[in-house]
Every structure is written in structure tokens, then in C-alpha cells.
Image (cartoon, rainbow, N blue to C red):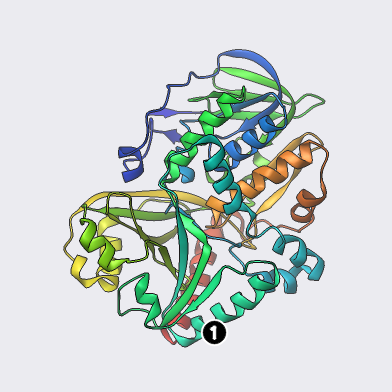
Amino acid sequence: MSRNPNNQSFPAPHAPSYYAATAHAAPERPPLAGAITTQVCVVGAGFSGLATAVSLAERGYQVVVVEASHVGWGASGRNGGQLVNGYSRDLDVVESRYGAKAAQALGSMAFEGAAIIRERVARYGIDCDLRDGGVFAALNENQLDELKTRVTSWQSYGNDALQMLDERTIREHTNTDLYIGGLLDKRGGHLHPLNLALGEAAALESLGGVIYERSPVTKVQPGAKPVVHTDGGQVRADTVVVCGNAYLGKAVPALRDRVMPVATQVMATEPLGAETANRLMPAGSCVEDCNYMLDYYRMSADHRLLFGGGTVYGGTTPADIEAKLRPHLARTFPELAKARIDYAWSGNFALTLTRIPHMGELEDNVYFSHGYSGHGVTTTHLAGRLLAEAIDGERERFEAFAALRNYPFPGGRLFRVPLSVLGSWYYQAREKMGL
């Protein structure tokens, strides 16, 4: 285990997850040593950094990526693997908070991230078990009404691949007594996220990009040509893009208090066999429920149930992940109450106070993007395209996000966790009352 001056530990190469155990072979990329120059230096080889780097390389830019550990080491290689469209706040909330113009701009891009992933998988032949179909599952009438409102909103922004599900038809996707209905988004889906990240890294390198692993960033020095400093070297660039997200640490102090790391956990059952897998989840869709502290799950390509949930503000890992998640699994599928769990792991995503991603500039030539608040698989890919557009002089869509005001968490680093926990208790209490 290595440690950088930001006091962050980076075990090599990955968390002990199902994804790491089934990842495709990847080259061992060297750490940065000495001083180099490039057009664009991207900090972080997760989805944000890779999506930005590939988009820039496709436009002809020379790109160098520096990564503290290994490609996809953070949330990008550990998440639930679900392509969830939209943002962590519905578009009607965006409109009420920022106005109709902002809602129209963000709404017009809300379904682009999943499309970018599908385009990239096809273009570069990325093998990542991509499947279509994502379900939002309602446990009560209030949640079902909210899904009906979402349909109206999403259709107004061009997503017509939606189908409301009743108590009978939702069983075609998740064969449980738990839900009274739901919403099928045919533009949603699921995949093996670590293999997607590894495939995108290979795509970048095929376009001439360079990735340095085991190169934690210690600081970003602004200037006419900013310099990214790592443990072993420096990258001088025309432009820097900071995509460290929940794992950036202290490297860029101006960003540190704008997001809060939040841990979520996932576990993978033993292989259930095709017959059981198809009976429990006949359509092969992924599912997330509509609770504030939600459960999410899907079948893997080898017929394991990947079941996630749990939220720990501040980003700490529970002592016993299986004990935390198993009651939720048993409630959803009672016949799996005693199923063997082969893998259980935790990872952090970055939460913003507004639950809307932050994109912007720290300097004229230092960009950043972070805070996808649980919708990272798709939104990171949108962000990568917008950052590349802005760097290439097409700023309108990037500015739609950059213009949104963002705030640090109230109470600073000391009180942001307890205040967030209090807020979550409020929403969970409302859910228990069916509100």
C-alpha cells in the first residue's frame, strides 16, 4: 500500500470486488518520472478523466492522464454498473432552483451520457457486458406518482423510450412482492464498469494518449502553462482538467469543501445459474428503488446478483458490508436470504450540496468536473464531452453547468457529515410514513 503527501492510501491495483476478479487483462502502466510537456493534462483515470481524454484525443489533442493508483481504481471501477439517465435531482427541481433556461439546457443533455457510452463501446469494440433497460421501482403510491411526473418531464426533453409498469408488469423485471409498480427506461441499462474503464483507457492509447499510473498528484500549480506535480514528476500543459472527484484529497484545496465523499456498498452472490437468474429478473434489466437510501441490483453476465445500497457520509467503509446489505437482499428476494456472498466491497462517490454536478474553471486554463452525486456512470461521460468542447472553443453547453451557483457544505468539514445524516433521517422517516 502506497501513501502520497495528501495522506490518501492507494492499494494496488483494485478493491477486492467482483469487477476486479473478472476484469480483462490490462497493461502495467508506469508512474510518471521526470518532467514532460503536453497540450492537455487530465488528473484522474476514472470515467470523468477517461471520457474527457478520449473526447479530446478524438479531436486531435495530445493528452496525458495521471492517475494516483490504476485505471478505474475509484468509483468508476466499483459502482453498481447501472446506466441511470438524468441527474440526482429531477429536472423540475432544476427549473425551480435555477430557472427555465437552465432546466432546458440541462434537460437537453440529460440522456446524452448513456448514448456516449453506447457509441464508444461500439466504436472501440469494448467488451463490458452492456445490456439495455433500467427500472425505477416504487414501494408506495407517492413514489409511483413521482415516477409519473418524471415520465412527463423526461418526455418533454425527448426521452420517449419510457414505460410505466404496474404491479404485474414490474415482475417481468424483478420477480418480487416488494413493489407496486415502476418505470422502465429503455435508454437505461447496465454493464461491467471496470471493463468499460479499461476499454476506454485502451481507446485513448490507440489515439495516441498516454496514461501514467501510480502517480498521485500533490498540487496543481497555476500559470500561463500550469504544472501538475506528482510524487515522481511534473506535467507542464497548455490546459489542465481536474477529475479526481471523491478521491482528489488535498491536491486542489479550492475544490475540497465543494464535495463530500459518500461510501456505498455492493456485494455479489454466488453464481445462481441461468434458470434462477432468469426467473428472478426475467427481462435482464437493472433495478433501483425510489427510496432516499435506495437499493440497486442487477444480474451479472455469469448469473450472480449484484446487490448494492447503504450510504455512509464521509466515505468510511462499514466493518461488515455483508451484514449491512443482506437484510435488504432478503427482503427483496427471500429465497436468496442465505445465498453465499462471494464478494463485498465499498467505494466512494462525491456528493454536492445541490446534488447537481459542478463543472467550471479554477483558472482560465484549469478546468474541473466533480460531484455526480450517485449518477456518475452516465453523467461523467457527458461531462467529458462538455469539457472537451469547451477546451476546443465550443463553450455554450459547458457554460450551462458552469453558470450554476454551487456552495460548500454548511458547517465545513467538521459538521457536513452530521448535518447530512440528520437530513437523511428526515427523508427516511417520511418514506416510512409513505410520504
User: Is residue 7 at least partly visible in the picture?
Assistant: no
Residue under circle 1? 145
Q: Position of residue 399 (x, y in %)?
A: 80, 51
Viewport quadrant of the N terminus: top left
- For label 1, the crowd category at 10 Å Cα-Cα, with few meaning under 14, some 14 to 19 and many 20 or more, is few
Relative to residue 375, is residue 165 drawn left or right? left
User: Is residue 54 at least partly visible in the picture?
Assistant: yes
Q: Position of residue 342 (x, y in %)?
A: 22, 49
Relative to residue 344, is residue 197 drawn left or right? right
Q: Identify the residue at the far top of this view.
A: 34
Relative to residue 2, is residue 342 drawn left or right? left
Q: Position of residue 220 (x, y in %)?
A: 68, 30
Q: Say which residue appears at 53% left-offset and 51% top-offset.
A: 377
Q: Say which residue appears at 58% left-offset and 45% top-offset.
A: 119
Q: Quadrant of residue 403?
A: bottom right
In this view, the residue in front, 26 or 346, is: 26
Say above or below: 105 vs 331. Answer: above
In this view, the residue in front, 195 or 373, is: 195
